[in-house]
Image (tube, rainbow, N blue to C red):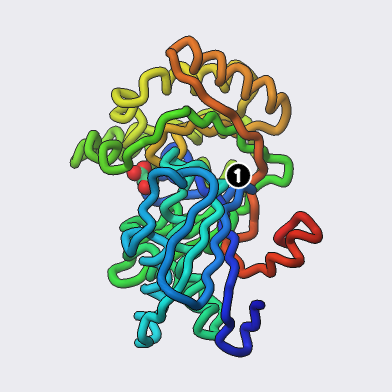
Amino acid sequence: MTNLNNHPESVSVRVPATAANLGPGFDSIGMAVDLWSELTVTRGPFEVTIEGDGADVLPTDEGNLVVAGARAAYNARGAEFPNLKFHCVNEIPFARGLGSSSAAIVSGIVAGFALQGDGTDPHEALLLAAEIEGHPDNVAPAIFGGCQIGVNAGDDWITSTIPVPEDLHAVILIPDFVGETSEARGVLDSEVSRADAVFNIGRSALLANALATGQMDLLRYATEDRLHQPQRAAIYKGMNTIIRAALTGGAHGAFLSGAGPSIMAFATEREYTVAYEMTEAARLHGIDASTRVVKPTTRGAHVFDPASTAATGTGD
Ligand code: HSE
């Protein structure tokens, strides 16, 4: 039972998938989408059990990021970390550029605070999660929901929400291989030219304004990038072809989701045509992939009652 007035025996948390970067917003902009993983933490001898995506490869020891997240929440209160059982139900595809690591960290933090009888202060959770993750573009939308700008200000992290049009859909092509974020960051240049900086600065601002004002025709340009996608094209063969196929199929814009390998397209109609065109382009490059059509979600990580979710089929 979850009782936030006491120290509950068990807490369940849902956390959304997130797409980082969104084209030009490298390490700075991310969006939560309506695709959720769940974590239940119960008092008892230490254990990590996992169902769903990544269950066969994720660590079941202290190295699992749900444990790191929960531990951070206890450390933040100066409290001793108790014995806990962690059960993960992962619907967010593992290591595909959809924020599975951030979801694990954030779910652990939210559960850790709830087990101490606290609600989660989203800003405090952001500081803890960004410290573990190193950048805010997945953890901020995972915590706050919606489309979030995240910037570092010394010891602090600042976030601001970009409103997103109601009718926007995200079409996600999810290759059947995992991406290594460390490899995908390793191919990036450590310095950028002024021309590339200007290219991305303008497009990041354009992206925020296009989403906030519903100017879909701007998204084609507003999702372009020169800071990470050109370099990552070398490890994700077919990436540029798949992005072009999404645009040909009717998407407003398309980009590498996070550090990849998933590719996300924004569409307000013809979503399944876009998904088909992306899948065909991937197939021509020998890439097997699945697709999901989802909406952005304004909801971030939250404690839920599994009993009522089972009854209603929704975590809301
Ligand atoms: N902004 C990050 C990157 C997201 O592109 O490397 C993945 O952690």
Q: Which amino acid does label 1 sit on?
A: Leu
Question: What residue is drawn where x is 34% and y is 32%?
Answer: 226
In the rendered image, the residue lying farthest to the front is: 45
Assign a secondary structure to mark 1: helix
Q: Where is residue 228 shown, x and y percent of the image?
A: 33, 35
Q: Where is residue 269 shown, x and y percent of the image?
A: 73, 28
When asked about the image quadrant of residue 150, the answer is bottom left
Please name whichever residue, 65 or 142, is drawn nearer the observer in this view of the structure.
65
Please name whichever residue, 63 or 250, is drawn nearer the observer in this view of the structure.
63
In which quadrant of this rendering is ligand 1 seen?
Answer: top left
* Residue 193 visible at all: no
When asked about the image quadrant of residue 303, the answer is bottom right
* Residue 285 visible at all: yes
Q: Where is residue 49 shown, x and y percent of the image?
A: 47, 58
In the rendered image, the residue lying farthest to the right is: 312
In the displayed structure, 38 sits above or below 251; it is below
Question: What residue is drawn where x is 41% and y is 42%?
Answer: 95
Residue 315 left/right relative to 62: right
Residue annotated with mark 1: 211
In the displayed structure, 123 sits above or below 98; it is below
Please name whichever residue, 112 or 218, is drawn nearer the observer in this view of the structure.
112
Within 8 Å of ligand 1, the CB of disc 1? no
- Quadrant holding the C terminus: bottom right
In the displayed structure, 169 sits above or below 99; it is above
Question: What residue is drawn where x is 64% and y is 48%?
Answer: 34
